[in-house]
Amino acid sequence: MIKIFIADDEQIVIDSLKYIVANFIKDAVIVGHAKSGREAIEKIELTKPDLVFMDIRMPGIDGLDAIRQIKKRRKDISFVIITAYENFNYAKEAVNLGVIEYLLKPVGKNKVIEVIEKAKGALFEDRQAVMQEIELREKLSRVMPHIEREFIYTLFFDSQSIKDYSFYEEIFSMPLDYGYIMLLTINNPAQKENVKASLDRYKMTSMLRETVKREIKCLAATFMLDRVIAFVPADKDQEEYVIRNRAIKRAEKIYQSLQDNAPLPFFIGIGSPYDIKNFLRSYEEADLAIKLSKDEVIVCYKDLVLPDSSTDLYPISKEKQLINQIMVGDIEGVRKLFEDIFQWLALNYAGDIEKIRIKLIEMYIVISRSVSYYKDDAKLGQNSFTDLINLTDLKELKSVIYNNLLKVTKYIQEIKHEEISSAVAKAMEYIDERYNQDITLDHVAKHVNMSYHYFSKLFKDETHRTFSEYLLEIRIRQAKQLLDAKDLSIKDVALHVGYQDPNYFSKIFRKATGMTPTEYKESLEIKEVKQGYGGKF
């Protein structure tokens, strides 16, 4: 339905337009009329029409001035000038104001219908666009928590895969080049995890994330069942001290809004601001700040007085290396790195078995997510997350996780071998079918979707010969068969196996067989003669 308003000081014009709309236009209604510019401005503010027919010459404020004032408040209204004056300056001003039509009185019925139908079409398209944008924003708001989590996860563990940060800056509507990590963790994790405890922790992390998002312009994501990681943009030109104080005030505001309603106690750690490539460092600092916070609820890494210089951050780099070794199927590398990480945990959390247990499970979840990106069916064993949570014996937990890591590493190793063998087989089939064409290593590499250098090495490793050697082998074999056909010349044979120059073909053939094509052909004839005489020669 399109809402129409008429502004004209001639009653006959108003009546005529009303008649046309009522009798010839579907889905249209006249919401009001006015006989002066001032009256039009006031009534249009109340009736909120979609389309206005506006006369220019009216008492008081003229039509063009009225349009100008109305557009300051309502830019979405379409205007049609309807006037008895054919004045170039009027028309020029109307165009500048975005008027969709300039009609001269008297206006015929068909023209009025045409203009209204045109406005209806434009209005429908605008409304469709608005609805689509609303739907898109609603969908985006539903998936935004997942997008933010995946971005933060990728930023920490696979930052090299992000090529264009401006794309994410547009999605998140915030700068991403500089900032700090605010980490919120639930305190006092349940010693014996069960469904109710897990549900309480899930509700708590969801509450933490919602509060952080409400209080701060940031990216926030829940990780594990005990933490929320928030990236907060900062101004690179501001002093670190200023950024730190503002971060603490924000954290205090978050804590105050939650302290009476939070079902579980929690800590807030704040890392130092870094550029985007070093956000992981800020997370490590926030995590360490919480671990060393003693009884303080809010703690900033820069405010810590570290107990000694040996205090180290969790070896996140080794965790990333461990993921990489699993991905490439390196069993020995996985064994060594897992043992290194476990030894670090045992040394730094000496006596605190619960912290070691939680950290191992956290690492296991991170690795599980990474592996799932490689292959959906590459599961880390049959143990569910709940099963692992319920394992209280540290030795048993270490054994289960380690065995599962080895199992999936072997699985990926097998998958990679199958993929490699399949790629080489596909390449050999491609060569066998096109040996008589001008094919190159680059052509074949593109066919199997591999880089030139990687395919070259892979082909040699799998077949124990180079691409050129294999192509030559196929061509010489086919040439021998063709030379046995007496009706083909050396030139014909050369062309049939991919050589345009018969002299070059002869040279290649001799190098491979020790004979020229002519000599080989003669040897076949001699052999045939010998066979004809029963082999007496």
Image (cartoon, rainbow, N blue to C red):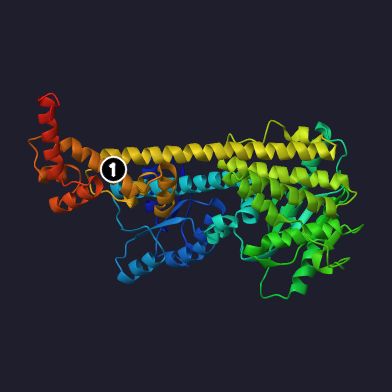
Instruction: Please name the amino acid that badge 1 sits on.
Output: Glu
Q: Secondary structure at mark 1?
A: helix
Question: Which residue is labeled 1 in the image?
Answer: 473
Q: Position of residue 475 (x, y in %)?
A: 24, 42
253 sits left or right of 333 in the view: right
**Front residue of 312 and 5:** 312
Give the quarter of the image for residue 84.
bottom left
How many numbered dots are placed on residues in this image? 1
532 to 55, vertically: above or below: above
Which residue is located at x 12 percent, y 30 percent?
537
Which residue is located at x 34 percent, y 46 percent?
444
**Front residue of 63 and 252:** 252
Give the quarter of the image for residue 407.
top right
**Front residue of 207 and 398:** 398
108 sits left or right of 355 in the view: left
Q: Position of residue 534 (x, y in %)?
A: 13, 23
Q: Position of residue 389 (x, y in %)?
A: 80, 37
Q: Is residue 489 visible?
A: yes
Tell me the crowding category of disc 1: few under 14, some 14 to 19, or many 20 or more residues within 10 angstroms, Cα based: some
Q: Is residue 145 visible?
A: no
Which residue is located at x 8 percent, y 42 percent?
489
Of all residues, the one furthest to the right in this rendering is 295
**Front residue of 493 and 19:** 493
Q: Position of residue 91 (x, y in %)?
A: 33, 66
72 to 354, vertically: above or below: below
499 sits left or right of 256 in the view: left
